[in-house]
Image (tube, rainbow, N blue to C red):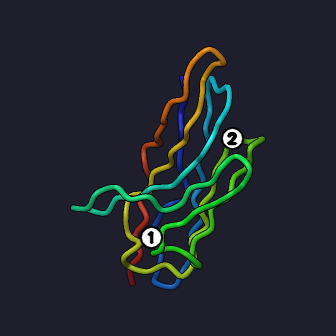
Amino acid sequence: QVQLVESGGGLVQPGGSLRLSCVASGRIFIIYDMAWYRQAPGNQRELVATIASNGNANYADSVKGRFTISRDNAKNTVYLQMNSLKPEDTAVYFCNAAMRVAATLGRGDYWGQGTQVTVSS
């Protein structure tokens, strides 16, 4: 069974920083793209950033220049460094990974349980 577990959320003042982590564990054959999404109350879940296994990254326009996604393939871990945080960044942040859990199985989509990020003075 595969699990994605996020950590690092919390309360921070505007202009502050947080670093989210997400560790994938369990029966994993290969991890392809990893990503961070977020969902604010009353809003749809939105893509924040993605990173391929080779390190190529893409960002939503709203976070470009402020957030950095990275990954450690040896540790099956993806990170999101969030700087210059704004109140509108407040949301539950979810980790996502596209992976195969066995060589004989196809690619599936896996999600973490989410971690709350609140930006407020």
* Residue situated furthest top in the rendering: 104
With respect to residue 67, does 8 lie above or below? Answer: above
Kind of residue at disc 2: Asn
Front position in the image: 16 or 104:
104
**Residue 45 at x, y = what percent?**
34, 55
- Quadrant containing the C terminus in the rendered view: bottom left
The structure residue drawn at horizontal position 54% and vertical position 52%, both measured from the top left corner, is: 35
- Taking the image as shown, residue 4 lies to the left or right of residue 28, namely left
Of helix, strand and loop, which one carries label 2?
A: loop
SS assignment at label 1: strand
Q: Is residue 34 left or right of residue 113?
A: right
Residue name at image x 56 percent, y 69 percent: 18
User: Neighbour class for label 1 at 10 Å: few (<14), some, many (≥20)?
Assistant: some
Give the number of marks.
2
Look at 44% across and 70% down and name the residue there. 11
The numbered dot on residue 101 is none
Q: Position of residue 8 (x, y in %)?
A: 55, 59
Mark with earlier residue (1, 2): 1
Which residue is identified by label 2?
A: 76
**39 left or right of 54?**
left
Disc 1 + disc 2, Cβ < 8 Å: no
The three-letter amino acid code for the residue at tag 1 is Leu
Measure the alpha-carbon separation of dots 1 and 2.
Answer: 26 Å
Residue that carries the numbered disc 1 in the rendered image: 11
Q: Which of the 4 quarters of the picture holds residue 117? A: bottom left
Q: Position of residue 109 (x, y in %)?
A: 48, 35
Q: Assess disc 2: are there few (<14), some (14-19) or many (≥20) residues with their C-alpha within 10 Å of its C-alpha.
A: some
Mark 1 vs mark 2: in front = 2
Above or below: residue 59 compared with residue 101: below
Residue drawn at x 46%, y 40% as measured from the top left: 111
Q: Quadrant of the N terminus?
A: top right
Residue sitting nearer the eye, 19 or 101: 101
